[in-house]
Image (tube, grey):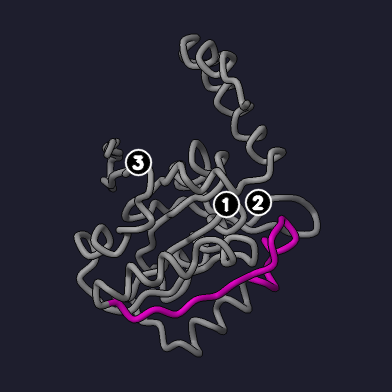
Amino acid sequence: MSIIDIELKHKKYKIHIEKGILNTIGEHIAELYKGKNIVFITDWNVEKFYLERVCISLEKSGFNIKYISIKPGEQSKTLSMLQEVYEKFCDYGIKRGDLIISLGGGVVGDLAGFAAATYLRGIKYVQIPTSLLAQVDSSIGGKVAVDLPYGKNLVGSFYHPEAVFIDSEVLQTLDKKFFNDGMSEIIKYGLIRDKDISDTVLKYDNK
């Protein structure tokens, strides 16, 4: 496993990178969270492929699991969907000592992160990004937001997760378009900060 330490002025957390880490995610969550109640926020696509696997691992570690599954896409990153998430939190009896886990791409991460930041004045949350763009960008920046009809990300905050868990295996089910979006972001970082990064990516052969 590769671990990247994020050290900010008021927050420290780790990014855990390992192929197949979803299969043992319960053990890793148990190391950082001593409570019992977890609520997942995911989308319909990710739910089909990965929710059951993650829930099995967490239940083996003794956690009580509930989840919220949303329609995939930017159209779900709205105040009305946020309201639905809050209502589910109320239905589930979520308390400040519970844990929210985002299992999905950037839209899910933004919505889950903003809900966690604002419900009960802040609940701890964990990011498990399932798109390449979320793995290299949105899951680790601390920016969480929802859209308004007037534009994207107009209502938001900075709220960092307790940890990020990245499993490269999930990219096998990622649509090529979204994979290319992530690769483009990596190339951009390389051009801005480190030419070796962009050179490595440009040698990539997806065959």
Closer to the observer: label 3 or label 1?
3
> In the rendered view of the protein, which quadrant contains the C terminus?
top right
Q: Do labels 1 and 2 touch, CB within 8 Å?
A: no
Q: Earlier in the sequence, mark 3 or mark 2?
A: 3
Q: Residue at x 32, y 59 (%)?
A: 25
Say few, some or many: other residues with alpha carbon within 10 Å of mark 2 (under 14 / 14 to 19 / 20 or more): some
Q: In x, y percent, where is residue 53?
A: 43, 65
**Mark 3 to mark 2 CA distance (whole Å):** 27 Å
Q: Residue furthest right?
A: 149
Residue 155: name its quadrant: bottom right
Q: Secondary structure at mark 3?
A: strand
Residue 17 got which mark?
3
* Amino acid at pointer 3: Ile
Label 1 or label 2, whichever lies nearer to me, is 1
The span shown in magenta is: 63-81
- The front one of 94 and 174 is 174
Figure check: 84 above or below 33: below
Q: With respect to residue 89, does 142 lie above or below?
A: above
Q: Earlier in the sequence, mark 3 or mark 1?
A: 3
- The residue pinned by badge 2 equals 153
